[in-house]
Image: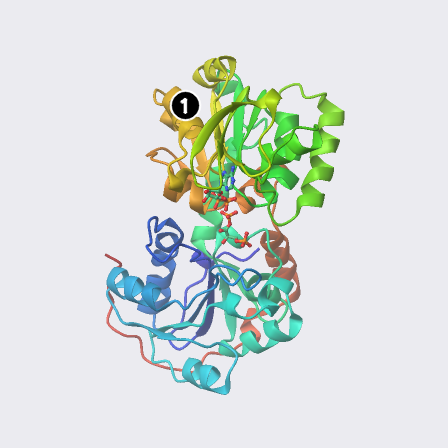
Amino acid sequence: MRLLADHTPAPGERWIYSAGFNAGPALADTGRIDVELADLARLSDAGARIALLSHQGSAKDGTARHLDHLAEYLTRRLGRPVRYLPENTTARARAAARELSPGGITLFGNTRLDPGEERGDPELARTLAGLGDRVAIGGFSKAHRRHASNTGLLDHLPGWAAAGLVGEARALDPWAAGAGSGSVDGPSVAVLGGVKPEKTLIGLRGLTRTHHLVIPGGVVLNTLLAVTGHRIGRSELGSDPEGCARVAREVLARTGGAGIHLPRVVVAAGPDGALRHLPLDRGVPDDHAIVDFEVQPGAIELLRRAGRVLVAGTPGRHAEGNRHAAAAVLAARAHAPEGTLLLGGDTVAELPWAGPRSTGGGSALQYLVEGTCAVFEALAANAARTDPTAHRPDPAPAPARSRPR
Ligand SMILES: Nc1ncnc2c1ncn2[C@@H]1O[C@H](COP(=O)(O)OP(=O)(O)O)[C@@H](O)[C@H]1O
Ligand SMILES: O=C(OP(=O)(O)O)[C@H](O)COP(=O)(O)O
């Protein structure tokens, strides 16, 4: 694939920059934004004109919001104005992209306000492509998605991999199964949690093959308990309960449950929010939901001895104060922060951890398990198919140089 780092931008080039600023409105963790700043500054310094596109939230559950607060943050960090135009498919949006001044950056409307984004709608991709002549693909957190604003744009424009995208993948390489295993002592453990189906569909399926122990939490745990006949009350099963249950059954049939931690005691919240520590074998009452669990002493011991630990998804509803499992895992790793990698937006934002982290949750799991993601395949195909010299920039002078702060 073509790397943006190898490209010398010319003044006037019209870029679409596809980013993954999917961070909560409070910007509790800005890693997904900060990783794109150097490329944005480099393009802008060279006099390129940048139509910045990002996703946030989802049209499926109504969590997609406008991104004005991101424009403010980008303006501050880049030390130059970043305007927000809350649309991206209109004639006005295309005119605004055409009228960008050299070095100018406009953040266009959240791509996830349009349900076509997550469907990978080719018509939406074609319309978005009208915002520029070339596309820089950042946004590692959506690298596993075939959405209009990443792989979709690569169907229409010559594409380059942004440094953030490449850097995130390279940082994961040493964590892939078997990579550098000679230099890592001790067993490997993966903690899977959160709510997204990828934790089960990719994480549970893949990491039970490569890790000595998998500690399921969140929806992964609830699904495993449901398919093994435990009463789980109103526990969360996520957006793909059938798909996750099928994979959980497959994994249990293959492993017989060996190498998978099941707690003896779960923490369940009742209808009034009151928490109860319940022995698993007694089952969770119908009006309760599992929000956390107690990690078994044997697993704590393995975590202490492990050479590498992945944490993908919070094991419990951490933001609401359910921190037993997470606190036990992090305490067992306090002596080895460099051997403990946190993956994913909420995980990185919510867990108090200063060690290595990836901006990708599902994408990082896919990259670790399968060695690639949809955008890398699409970028490689795009490089083989498109001729970037066919797109001639409008001549325009370069602006004064400045650096990201
Ligand atoms: N048992 C549980 N029931 C419901 N939600 C949970 C449970 N455990 C964790 N969660 C929630 O999962 C969210 C993170 O899920 P996810 O998006 O999959 O993680 P990430 O963004 O790190 O990839 C957290 O905000 C947490 O509150
Ligand atoms: O937050 C994200 O991923 P993550 O929850 O797997 O860390 C990405 O922005 C991808 O979002 P999506 O899982 O709604 O496609």
- Front in this rendered view, residue 278 or 376: 278
Locate residue 307, reporting x and y percent. Answer: 47, 20
For image coordinates 51% across by 70% down, the residue present is 134
Q: Where is residue 337 in the image (x, y as percent from the top left)?
A: 37, 27
Determine whether, in the image, residue 330 is placed left or right of residue 214.
left
Q: Which quarter of the rendered picture does the N terminus lie within?
A: bottom right
**Image side of residue 89 versus residue 200, left or right:** left
Residue 11 spot, x, y in % from top left: 37, 75
Residue 217 appearing in the image: yes
Quadrant containing the C terminus is bottom left
Of 267 and 221, which appears nearest the observer? 267
Is residue 370 visible in the rendered image? The answer is no
Q: To which residue does mark 1 refer? A: 328
Specify the quadrant of the image occupied by residue 248: top right
**Vertical comparison of 252 with 67: above or below:** above
Front residue of 187/58: it is: 58
Dot 1 amino acid type: Ala
Q: In this view, does 397 lie above or below 25?
A: below
Going by the image, does 399 lie left or right of 56?
left
Percent position of residue 219, x then y: 57, 39
